[in-house]
Amino acid sequence: MYSPSGGSLGFLIASHCRDPGDWQKLVFQPYFNWFANDNNYAGYTVDNGTNDAYEELNKTKPDATVWWVLNRGVSYWVPTSMCGWRESWSKVIGYFKDEELENSTGAWKIGFSTGCTGSDNALVKKTQSNYYSGKVFMVEYNELKAEPGDSGGLVFRAGCNGGECGVLAMGIIIGAIPPGGPYYYTLFQSVENATNYYGVVVYDR
């Protein structure tokens, strides 16, 4: 993500994935080793989203927040070789708007727990329930598997934009239906909803 006003670089993550404790707004990436005195402080988050999309009363709040990165860059390349794609890495060249997502096909995700899952035939639907805050979309679980720990993982699809081809972002994993399983649908928060809420844009330079 990129902040046009402040020039900061960051990335989207699920709001409910914030670090616990007194340093919950600090980000350590990719690893932090307290015992080795590893000064791997990477940034911070100002989380104005919801930490519980199921119980949130303000339905405009997304289950998403931006983690601002300090003292290091942000990559817009996705390791699509994990998905069995020919390209080892694919550049993020843009994102889908909400109206383009509903009833479209194709969804892949990369998450911490289950790696890459997805299908070019996966049908994307908008959730009809008011149970979730923000703009939430769903894909059948057998087409887009996700487990606890995958939250915040990028959901994407191959595509082209202005003659350039690569990855178009769709959103980030936030949960599943029903909560606690057995799961029938995987849920993701849309990029457009989150970026509009925080006033940021997709970093695709």
Image: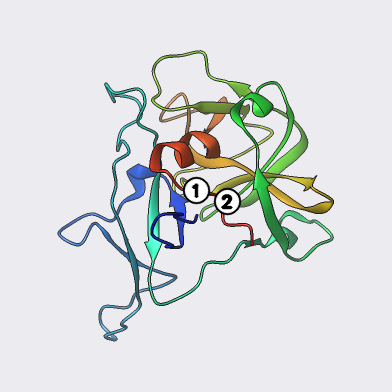
Q: Closer to the camera, 154 or 182?
A: 154
Q: Nearer the viewer, mark 2 or mark 1?
A: 1
User: Which of marks 1 and 2 precedes in the sequence?
Assistant: 2
The residue carrying mark 1 is 150
Callout 2: helix, strand or loop?
loop
Residue type at the position of mark 1: Asp
- 131 lies above or below 188: above
Q: Closer to the camera, 57 or 151?
A: 57
Look at 40% across and 51% down and name the residue there.
Answer: 66
Callout 1: helix, strand or loop?
loop
Q: Hey, which quadrant is residue 130 in on the image?
A: top left
The residue carrying mark 2 is 114
Look at 62% across and 33% down and name the residue there.
Answer: 97
Residue 119 lies, in percent from the top left, at 75, 39
- 154 lies above or below 179: below
Q: Closer to the camera, 139 or 60?
A: 60
Residue 166 lies, in percent from the top left, at 76, 54
Look at 39% across and 34% down and name the residue there.
Answer: 62
Residue type at the position of mark 2: Thr
Q: Is residue 64 left or right of residue 56?
A: right
Residue 127 lies, in percent from the top left, at 53, 19
In the displayed image of the protein, which residue is found farthest to the left? 22
What is the crowding at mark 2: few (fewer than 14 residues within 10 Å), some, or many (at least 20)? Answer: some
Q: Is residue 162 left or right of residue 197?
A: right
Question: Is residue 154 in view?
Answer: yes
Contact between labelled residues 1 and 2, with CB atoms less than 8 Å apart: yes
Q: CA distance from mark 2 to mark 1?
A: 7 Å
